[in-house]
Amino acid sequence: MIGKRNKSVLVFACIFIIGFGLFFYTPEVNNASVTYFNLTLKAYAYNPMPDIANLIKQQLLRIGINVEIVLESIPNWDWWFYRDFDLRYFEIKDIVNLRNLYLVNMINSFYRENGSLNDFGYDITMDYSESLGTGINEWMIKEISSMIPPMSQERYELCWEWQDYLMGNFLPCVPMFSEPDYIAYWHNLVGFNYTVGLTHSWGNMWWDGTHPGQVLTNEIIIADEEWKNLNPLFNLEIRDDADEFINDLILDSLIVRDSDFSYWPHLAQSLEYIADDQIRFTLRDGIYWQDYGVFTNNPLTANDVYFTLYMSNQSGISDWIKNITKVDSKTIDVSLNYYDCIDDIAEFKILPEHFLNQTQEIDGITPDITHPSWTEYASNCFGTGLFKLEDYEGDIETTLKLNQDSWRLDSTITNDPALDYIRRYGDYSNGLDTLTIRIMPDGNTALYEFEAGKIDLIEIDRPFDKRDQYLCDPTKYVQSKPAQHFGILALNMRETRSHIGSREPCPLAPDLTVGLAIRKAIAYAINKQEISEIIFNDERMIIDHPIFPHFGKWLHPNIIRYCHNLDVANLYMLAAGFDLPWCGQSGPIDLPDWEEVCNPDYEYERITISVNDYAFLVFLAVFSVLTSIQLVVLKKLTKRREKNEK
């Protein structure tokens, strides 16, 4: 009898211990082991797009998102207009030739509500501000586009602030990769910098001895296609990179945009906004045109600028020009059709009025473009620049010589602190005075000539076998630079997309929408490094900015990055209401800052869900069940004892 009582006491003690333990138990939350929903990913049907899409599918499955891939051919544009996708991977070169797509054009096209390339679905209701009367993102882009002066530090900083705002508050895309451009050159060429370019490097370059096949040490030899028309005002349909390259060598612009997208005075000593829509250019003294025939000792004047702007506007090239006024021999005022024309001005080359405006039409004003000087100039371009055209042999080669009378070699002009000329261009003291451009439209022929030492520098296209060969060759050097190309994964934020575009608040992070939490989960789940290694042999640049990687100073110096972390990705899915434990959650969860996640020493502190709010009920339930079982057992034992006693 005593033994049975002891057993009963032991059972009740066990029940109490189990219930008491449940009061403090906090189970771990495991990663997603089920599929929560499907997303549609669209991409072009040619590589590397399908391969990238497949890897994204595999990576997102790890956080419970199943991706259905739809491959589209280029002629099928229905998806472009209807945006019937959740995700879309594309590379910028797939859409249009964006060679002249400047920063402002890009952000207005991509990230404003009515942007022609707004794949992402931003609209002003997503961040509407009563005080601004529009969305904050919309307002920031408009400010970047119209801020005066356009080369101010404040404008750069506003652009950085906008990038941070966009990628933190909306995350319309996951920037993925950029394919760099490569160039190879002989090892004894010193001072060349591919990022800034050949002409910017010229004043710092020199030959340290000779390489096989090299004859002269005052000359650089390159290869290019044949130029067609050196007059930048006409025959635009046949002009290409070869024409523009030679124009850049011979002609000058009023201002210059360096490779880091900083802007500098050039022919214009100053650029002043005398009104929001009016610029005043004041020209430098001491700049002369190259002598050509009987045309000698001609200074650069406001007539040249007026003439070039007028003709450019008449031919429809410069739509930024509204009206032109010549103030005096060194000053020109230009009224603008739109604010952001700084890149147009930087690309704009000034032409010699004294040569091209020898006769006028019957009105006595309009230059007569039928005059022989126009035809002559198309093949015998001359300007104020660093080089002059020395010789041209049909489809064989073009030779340019350093213009020894150029203002760019005159230290009394270039010592202007506003130019910072020596740092940017060098001092031209190393003896290089000739640039020979051999006409070789066939890339393989150019490669053979480079390897034979008959060409000094050559850009390398795909496949990159030659690049790898030159990297292993001690007589060759290879440099790379960011290209005007990148691949991004667009995330469709439109409310019509039920999950990724949801604007409902997150159950466990009310400050976030469900859609934003899912987009951040996707960003953290995607392993760019893995994709780069598998598909590109780790050759593409991994990028994080929502703009071209070659935009230099416009790039935020500390942009938000979504460093791959599956634990953090699952945490955002949890915040959005997916993978909740059976007992629920009583309050918001803490989400780590991106800088914490990207810290190499970051360790994910696995989240636990407390059941304390439910512990008493759990205890009662467990206690009741176990007590009932014990009572049933005791009742049976009592009946058995009574039966035995009888």
Image (spheres, rainbow, N blue to C red):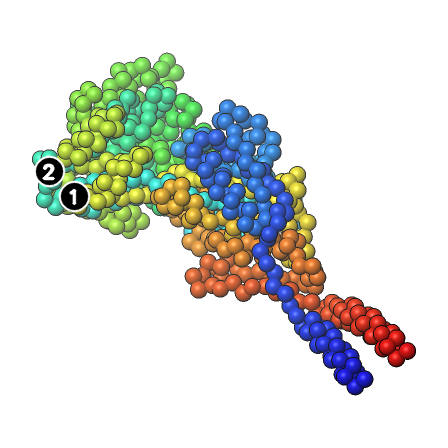
| CB contact under 8 Å: marks 1 and 2 | yes
Circle 2 SS class: loop
Placement of 65 over or under 622, stated as above or below = above
Query: Measured from the top left, where is residue 249 in percent x and y?
Result: 25, 34
- Is any part of residue 578 visible from this angle? yes
Placement of 289 over or under 576, stated as above or below = above
Read off the residue under disc 2: 212
Read off the residue under disc 1: 475
Circle 1 SS class: loop
Q: Nearer the viewer, residue 619 or 638?
A: 638
> Residue at point 18% right, 37% down?
456
> Residue at point 72% right, 76% down?
14
> Residue at point 41% right, 47% down?
542
> Residue at point 18% right, 25% down?
397
In the rendered picture of this protein, how many numbered marks are placed on residues?
2
Q: Nearer the viewer, residue 233 or 196?
A: 196
In the image, taking residue 106 as reference, residue 202 lies left or right, namely left
Q: Nearer the viewer, residue 262 or 94?
A: 94
- Is any part of residue 116 visible from this angle? no
